[in-house]
Image (cartoon, helix red, strand yellow):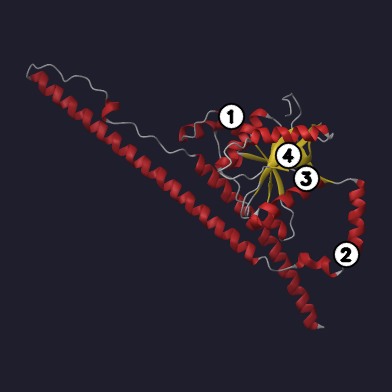
Amino acid sequence: MATRKQRAPVQYVQLDGLVVLKLIKHCQEEGAGGTDLVQGVLLGLVVDNRLEITNCFPFPRHSEDQEDFNEVQYQMEMMRNLRHVNIDHLHVGWYQSTYFGTFINRPLIDSQYNYQDSIEESVVLIYDPLKTTQGFLSVKAYRLTPAMMKFHSENDFTTENITKHGMTFDKMFEEIPVVTKNSHLVNSLLCNLEEKDKEADKFNFLDLATSSMLQKNLRQLMECVDATTMDINKYLNCQRQIMRQQQAKQQYLQKRQQDNAMRAQRGEPPLPEEDLNKLFKPLQSPPRLDCLLYSGQIDNYCQQISSFSTQSLGKLFMAESLQNDGQSN
């Protein structure tokens, strides 16, 4: 695994074409059309201000019956074998597929925190196979911000701690630019393939059928908004219960003061002191991390919908102008 040293911060990620092809192949073979998540390990090294990812291998799927399977031992054995054949074997992060950009959740936050805590320069690559099938290669690199690392390390996700750190959904992740690099031989091969390509295939990007992608993104957005509403209602109900408990506590204290005053007039000793926490057990507020994650996911959906809408409107305006020119001629 990569050693922790004082390095300049990573400005961009350089991705080998081999890694992209392996990632796509892994999703096609085990991703069940994009609905099942696939994950794997990224290997490479840090050079100056860039993170070079030169190879990867998938996490193996195993059933619940295979209880003796050790994922850590498997990863170490794979990296040892790659080192023997003189391939970059330093662990620099991990990758995960996503379904319509649905990746901002608690498991990803926890996994990336563990990676960055042990490997400072590590990133997570998010690959969207369904968006890629529409002609847009979707590979993005993310890391947790220093503020999110500090906030997560305290493991206190209450409203007070969120306010203390000033944490918002746009301060959780930072996206790092991704650059794909191929060797000169691969570039020469791609140029030859492009020359042999049919002329008709060059206009596939003009396909107007993007409404299905917009509908699915909108449906995912509505489900996320509903989940956010349920989480907010849960928090508001807890706040109401805390307010009722505070009112009951104040009423109990007032009644106790009145009883002690009456006993003092009669010359009787005051009532013994009682622990209020035993009478009124403190209510714990629900953690607010889920609300931050829902907000970040909603923002991601909105960005995707805006991107698809802009492209669709541009294609429709171009198609309309072509149709008008054809009718005038």
Query: What's the mark number on residue 150?
Result: 1
- Marks 3 and 4: CB-CB under 8 Å? yes
Kind of residue indicated by mark 2: Asp
Where residue 75 appears, as percent x and y from the top left, is 69, 35
Marks 1 and 3, Cα distance to the nearest angstrom?
A: 31 Å
Kind of residue indicated by mark 1: Lys
Q: Which one is in front, 162 or 128?
A: 128
Marks 2 and 1, Cα distance to the nearest angstrom?
A: 51 Å
Up the image or down, 141 lies above or below 6; here it is below
Residue 275 left/right relative to 195: left
Neighbourhood count class around disc 3 (C-alpha, 10 Å): few under 14, some 14–19, many 20 upward = some
Q: Which one is in front, 298 or 2?
A: 2
Of tags 2 and 1, the one toward the viewer is 2
Which residue occupies 25% across, 35% down? 248
Kind of residue indicated by mark 4: Leu
Disc 2 secondary structure class: loop
Mark 3 or mark 4: whose residue is earlier in sequence: 3
